[in-house]
Image (tube, rainbow, N blue to C red):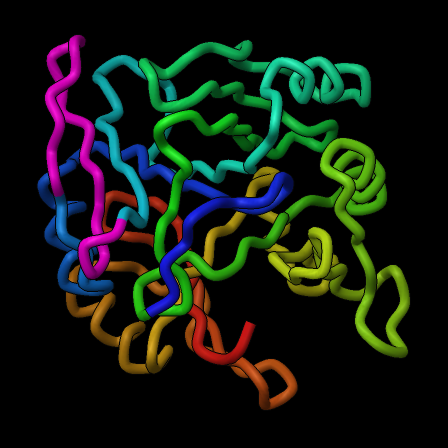
Amino acid sequence: MPHVQQHSPGSFNWLELGTTDQKAAQEFYGQLLGWQPRDFPMRRNFNYTMFLLNGRMVSGCYPIQQGQPASPHWDLYVAVDNADETAARAAELGGVVLQPPADVVTFGRKAVIQDPTGAVFSVWQAKEHIGVRIAGEHGALCWADLNTPGRLRAKEFYEALFGWQLVPGKDKTVDSYLHIVNGEAYIGGILPDSQRDKNAPPHWLIYFQVTDCDVSTAKAQELGAQVHMPPVSIENAVRYSVLADPQGAVFALFTGRV
């Protein structure tokens, strides 16, 4: 059970679920991924849920308030050394700063950014809260894919912003799946046009590691999830599926070596 002590800049270090039914989400992800919820009262009369996996922080959850335009969704965070500098650089590169850098109590400093193709993500400058503290376990974050029609524009933006390398696989072209390499770590990718959901707006898709993708997909469906893509294999090496939880937040399940 790998314990995470710190996140290198450019790595995916946190994720949050925005949902219309916190209690239902707690039950769903608890049964599916083994998460344990811990609620913390906030000043605006709502609870922030911290999900734990084997006693280690794995994700957060907050309620979407009535009147807010957002639908249930997962938010992806990227670790940075300086949120203010990163947000300013993102704007220079053609991104839009949707929420300017601000302190989140004493836990860290956050900014919300939309890339030039329309996909939204957050950056996190850690203070007391480094983010995800567990990896390599059933139920842990393991990967993230960008779904966008502007693949080359996104490649240019993220390489300049985070220092990522976006590279095709061996003997593949730039039109194929692009792997995101942060330092020496493979952390995600950009889907090729043949695999992306052309009916969805640009977005980041989060993957959770599971012991058996087929078994977990079937269990998710029994718990009320909608299966957008049933389990499929890639080069006989990994297997994944794409689902929406009972409130509509989309995520993926993944079995295999990252």
Q: Per the image, is 83 magenta?
A: no
Q: Quadrant of the C terminus?
A: bottom right
Q: Is residue 197 above or below residue 154?
A: below
Magenta-span inclusion, residue 42: yes
Q: Main secondary structure of the magenta part?
A: strand
x 38%, y 47%: residue:
132
Is residue 257 rendered to the left or right of residue 241? Answer: right
Residue pictured at 53% horizontal, 12% vertical? 101
Identified at 21% across, 16% down, the residue is 66
Q: Can residue 86 be seen here?
A: yes
Residue 8 locus on image (x, y percent): 59, 44
Check the picture and name the quadrant holding the N terminus.
bottom left
Residue 175 at x, y percent in the picture: 85, 61
- Relative vertical location of residue 157 with respect to residue 170 in this rendering, above or below: above
Looking at the image, residue 42 sits to the left or right of residue 99; the answer is: left
Q: How many callouts does the rendering have? A: 0
Find residue 16 and report its image quarter.
top left
Residue found 79% across the figure and 20% down from its top: 94
Residue 201 placement (x, y as % from top left): 58, 38
Q: Classify 249 as above or below 255.
A: above
Side of 193 where 138 appears, left or right: left
| Residue 243 visible in the picture | no
Rendered location of residue 174, percent (x, y):
88, 60
Relative side of 194 to 25, left or right: right
Decide: is 7 above or below 166. Answer: above
Depth order, front residue of 109/188: 109
Tell me the magenta residue range.
Answer: 38-56
In the image, 8 versus 43, the foreground residue is 8
